[in-house]
Image (tube, grey):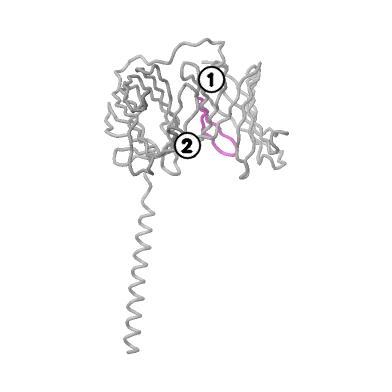
């Protein structure tokens, strides 16, 4: 009896050991499978497109109705394809609509962030995040519908060289059911098709206050090491920067690459103008994670532009301030950890225009 028990125990131990070894080997094999590198999954979207759109809107009697719009979509790559800027203009029964979407790839999660803004206020919505599998892209996020927070899903499908389908749906029951409210069919425009850049604007208008940034630049950057710690050590960077206009001058996209002792930085700044508040929103993103930071918001007064927001330093929220002096092409960033009573400058930029 004792021998049988010992034999049974030995058999079970060997079996469990084999099972554990099998699990370890399977886990090792699974972990060795490289994650899908999706940085080129949106390449199909680059180009100029004609689009036919159906949007679900609430009618005056409280019911829902679909309206049709037709327009043009222009998509340009950034960061060598790891990001894209999409601009759209469309017309229909509700008038003219103009928007943009900033697509940014996160190489750490292998996912894309889809950030949309309407030219009416220039504010980026909460991003949808997702990825492509088997020729289909599914993106998820949150939205506000009639004062209620709902789930939102964007789906890219039927992807061909010269056409694709995009659809947005909302869910108010945790994803159990989805109601489409935006459907777009896109067909590639013929080569040389004229692209609309928005209506011409008065160069002296507030939405042109950032025009001094347009063009190609050489930048000398100074970054304070370990801000808000009493540090007085600065690191120099040198960068190349290109800024171009969007929305006919009511917005800008700046891309730059910097290198120095601390390494290489590749980033972008999206600047959008809100004609209602007559203020600018400044959005920053770094290619390391493809995420858009909380914007700094402000305006120009006289020869100076001041912009404020929040930031995280050493795990704590602080205020951040941007100041531009266009006449001298000088920029400074500063932090405050005492509610704005005092400010410590931690980033300085001087620019020199590159002659074309």
Image x and y of residue 287, in percent: 49, 36
Quick check: 154 above or below 216? below
Image x and y of residue 141, in percent: 42, 38
In the rendering, which numbered label is found on residue 291? none
Mark 2 or mark 1, which has the lower sequence index? 1
- 330 left or right of 246 in image: right
Q: Nearer the viewer, mark 2 or mark 1?
A: 1
Magenta residues? 253-269
- 233 left or right of 85 in image: right
Q: Are marks 2 and 1 in contact (CB under 8 Å)?
A: no
Q: Is residue 280 magenta?
A: no
- 88 left or right of 158 in image: right
Residue 340's quadrant in the figure? top right
In the rendering, which numbered label is found on residue 290? 2
In the rendering, which numbered label is found on residue 276? 1
How many labels sit on residues?
A: 2
Question: What residue sits 33% from the left and 88% below the top?
Answer: 3
Q: Is residue 265 magenta?
A: yes
Question: What residue sits 34% from the left and 85% below the top?
Answer: 5
Decide: few, some or many residues near mark 2? Use Cα within 10 Å; few <14, some 14-19, many ≥20: many
Judged from this view, the residue extending furthest toward the front is: 61
Q: For the residue labelled by badge 2, is the local secondary structure a helix, a strand or a loop?
A: loop
CA gap between label 2 and label 1 equals: 29 Å
């Amino acid at each position: 009896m004792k021998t049988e028990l010992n034999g049974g125990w030995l058999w079970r131990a060997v079996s469990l050991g084999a099972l554990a070894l099998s699990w370890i080997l399977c886990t090792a094999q699974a972990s060795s499978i490289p994650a899908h590198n999706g940085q080129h999954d949106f390449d199909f979207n680059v180009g100029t497109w004609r689009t036919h759109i159906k949007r679900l809107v609430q009618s005056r009697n409280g019911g829902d109705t679909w309206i049709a719009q037709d327009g043009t979509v222009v998509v340009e790559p950034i960061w060598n394809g790891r990001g894209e800027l999409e601009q759209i203009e469309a017309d229909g029964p509700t008038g003219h609509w103009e928007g943009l979407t900033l697509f940014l790839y996160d190489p750490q999660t292998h996912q894309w962030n889809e950030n949309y803004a309407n030219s009416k206020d220039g504010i980026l919505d909460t991003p949808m995040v997702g990825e492509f599998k088997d020729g289909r892209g599914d993106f998820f996020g949150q939205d506000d519908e009639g004062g209620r927070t709902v789930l939102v899903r964007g789906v890219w499908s039927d992807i061909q060289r010269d056409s694709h389908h995009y659809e947005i749906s909302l869910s108010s029951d945790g994803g159990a059911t989805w109601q489409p409210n935006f459907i777009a069919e896109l067909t590639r425009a013929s080569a040389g098709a004229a692209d609309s850049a928005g209506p011409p604007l008065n160069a002296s208008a507030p939405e042109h206050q950032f025009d001094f940034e347009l063009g190609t630049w050489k930048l000398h950057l100074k970054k304070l090491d370990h801000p808000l710690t009493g540090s007085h050590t600065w690191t120099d960077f040198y960068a190349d920067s290109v800024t171009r206009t969007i929305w006919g001058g009511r917005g800008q996209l700046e891309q730059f690459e910097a290198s120095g002792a601390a390494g290489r930085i590749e980033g972008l700044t999206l600047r959008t103008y809100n004609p209602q508040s007559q203020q600018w929103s400044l959005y920053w993103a770094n290619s390391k994670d493809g995420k858009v930071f909380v914007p700094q918001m402000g305006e120009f007064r006289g020869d100076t532009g001041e912009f404020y927001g929040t930031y995280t330093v050493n795990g704590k929220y602080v205020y951040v301030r941007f100041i531009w002096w266009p006449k001298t092409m000088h920029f400074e960033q500063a932090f405050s950890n005492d509610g704005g009573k005092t400010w410590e400058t931690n980033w300085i930029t001087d620019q020199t225009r590159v002659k074309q």
